[in-house]
Image (spheres, helix red, strand yellow):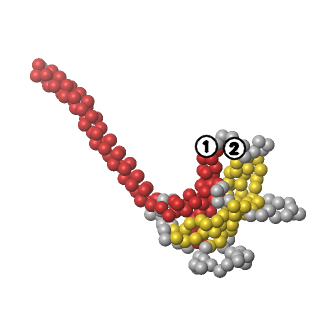
Amino acid sequence: MKSEVRNQKFLRRNCTEVKAKKPMKYWFFGFLGVVCLLLGQGIKAQETIRGVACPSDIETLMTWMLKDLPGYGNRVTQRARRSDSTVDIYNYIVLTSKPEFEPLPLTNLQYEPVLPDDTQQVFFTTLERQYNKTGVVLLQNYYWLFLTPSSDGWRSVLLFSQLADLQQDDLPLPPQDAMNGAIGQGINLWLKDCRAGVLRQ
């Protein structure tokens, strides 16, 4: 009888110790497994992001760019608003059109280029929502983009914009330099990411 009591006490004591130690024993290995899993997923995601090469042909390049351009341009606008709280009017880019590649003849040049001109002309349209003190206005804008290939990828040379929402009898407005606007800065940021191979497609 006494031996059975001793055995029961021994079993209860040791089982309690085992139950107390077992979670501590395997906690470290579980934590280590989670860390390895997360690191593996991060490396795999990084390899996936960096696995997309920047397109060399202008058609694919512009198709990818115009799909991402609203996000890039809107981030430029948001950063500008945060740095200057006095800005009362700002545009939100809703969407972009498909690119058009038929170039306009530049017959007004007064000189013959010394180097071969490999600049590409691209045309696209944006739908933008302008916020001001009185309300919201929808604007349609035309863009005329000049791109040139370089040793490490495409780079923007010029960007002109023109307001498309005009009345039928209104005179067309002259093109304006848009390189420093949200669209121009968004294009340069996108091309930089494209050359670095960090785009997600």
Disc sitting over residue 87 in the figure: 2
Q: Looking at the image, which residue is at 64% across and 49% down? A: 77
Residue 9: x %, y % from top left: 17, 23
Residue at the image position 10 percent from the left and 22 percent from the top: 3
Residue at the extreme right: 169
Residue type at tag 1: Ser
Amino acid type of disc 2? Val
- What residue would you read off at disc 1? 83
Whether residue 14 sits left or right of residue 91 in the image: it is left
**For the point 60% across and 77% down, which residue is it?**
117
- Helix, strand or loop at label 1? It is helix
Q: Is 99 above or below relative to 34? A: below
How far across and down, in percent of the image, does residue 157 sit?
A: 61, 66
Q: Nearer the viewer, residue 143 or 67?
A: 143
Q: Picture quarter containing residue 63?
A: bottom right
Residue 131 lies, in percent from the top left, at 73, 46
Asked whether 26 or 110 is in front, the reply is: 110
Secondary structure at numbered mark 2? loop
Q: Is residue 159 visible?
A: yes
Relative horizontal placement of residue 122, taking residue 174 as reference (left or right) = left
Left or right? Give the position of 167 relative to 149.
right
